[in-house]
Image (tube, rainbow, N blue to C red):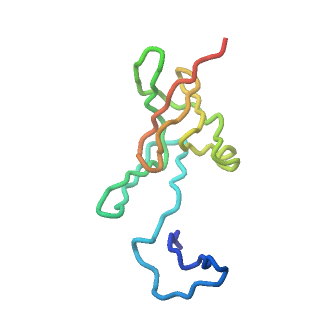
Amino acid sequence: MSVWHGTLRKKKPSGGRKRAYRKKRKFEKGSFPAETSLGELKRKTKRGHGGTVKTRLLSATHANLSNPSTGKTERTKILRVVKNPASVDYDRRGVITKGAIIETQLGTARVISRPGQNGVVNAILIPKKT
């Protein structure tokens, strides 16, 4: 089973149904989300449209953490996923996506990269409120 991004299932602007005039095409085929989790490093490469190569991150232990106040970036260990505003289910399961709040050794951070698309976890340190 796969994800399909064709338009044959949609209705016409008048409300009538569209009749299939051809079969599904390979370029309309999509894929399921990578759903990056915490665990030993696992990556998977996928050939995209036009021969581009996407690296999907399936699980990760470390993140590239940028500190906006000092301007330095360093690789730190991810301790846990605090919150994921993308989905309640992702929040419960601890899936890392863009916008997820993670806890690292240097403090809490927000993920700014798309791990399922880029193959890396980049994050920005959230300043502590005083």
Vertical arrangement, residue 110 with respect to residue 35, above or below? above
Most foreground residue, 48 or 10: 10
What is the quadrant of residue 16 in the picture? bottom right
Quadrant placement of the C terminus: top right
Residue drawn at (61%, 36%) of the image: 81
Residue 31's spot in the image, x, y percent?
48, 64
Residue at image point 68% right, 50% down: 89
Which residue lies at the image location 30% right of the left edge and 63% below the top edge?
A: 50
Q: Position of residue 128 (x, y in %)?
A: 62, 17
Q: Tell me residue 49's x, y (percent).
A: 35, 64
Residue drawn where x is 45% and y is 25% of the image: 66
Residue 1 position, x and y percent, is 53, 73
Above or below, comparing residue 4 to residue 23 in the picture: above
Q: How many marks?
A: 0
**Residue at the front extreme of this rendering:** 14
Return the residue found at the far top: 130
Comparing 123 with 44, the one in front is 123
